[in-house]
Amino acid sequence: MSVFSGMRISASGLSAERLRMDTVSANVSNVKTTRTEEGGAYKRKIPVFEENYDEKLGMLGVKTVKIEEDKSPLRKVYQPEHPDADEEGYVEYPNVDLLVEMSELMTASRAYESNVDTLNAQKNMISKALEIGR
């Protein structure tokens, strides 16, 4: 195990949490989007992560597998005057819940801070080890 493997793991965690925060940001900014290029209302996005492990090197951190769409149903609101209303007067709105997104954002933010703290602790340990060698 390399002295820098812990730093590599923390750095991959930072990248993963940044991607999760970016995904939350996209979800929040599209909370009222009823028409997308693909057609229909915006569907909430969720990043999927898994461990990045190599037989020779061991744990390399976390990697992004994909960003998938949330399968929960879209919200239907009765607004017959809306241009995207169906024949019955209902408009499909994104399946984005602001409370869920804010809790996701807080979780990602705390995990990001933890990775920064871990990275700084590793940096300090390496620095102290180099001082011992003097």
Image (cartoon, rainbow, N blue to C red):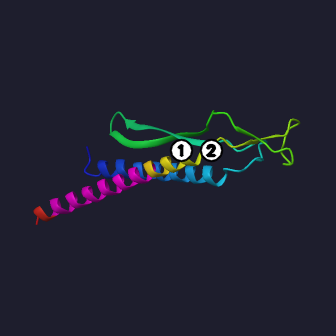
Where residue 96 is drawn, which disc sits there?
Answer: 2
For the N terminus, give its image quadrant: top left
Residue lying at 89% horizontally and 36% vertically, measured from the top left: 87
| Residue 53 visible in the displayed image | yes
Q: Are marks 1 and 2 in contact (CB under 8 Å)?
A: yes
Within the magenta stretch, is there residue 39? no
Residue lying at 56% horizontally and 41% vertically, measured from the top left: 46
Q: Nearer the viewer, residue 39 or 83?
A: 83
Residue 2 image point, x, y percent: 26, 47
Residue 55 image point, x, y percent: 35, 33
Between marks 1 and 2, how big is the CA–CA gap?
8 Å
Query: Which amino acid does the dot numbered 1 rest on?
Result: Val
Query: Which amino acid does the dot numbered 2 rest on?
Result: Val
Residue 67 image point, x, y percent: 58, 41
Q: Nearer the viewer, residue 36 or 15?
A: 36
Looking at the image, residue 97 sits to the left or right of residue 32; the answer is left
**In the rendered image, the vertical position of residue 95 relative to residue 125, given as above or below:** above
Residue 66 is drawn in which quadrant?
top right
Residue 29 image point, x, y percent: 64, 55
Residue 76 is drawn in which quadrant?
top right
Q: Which residue is mark 1?
A: 100
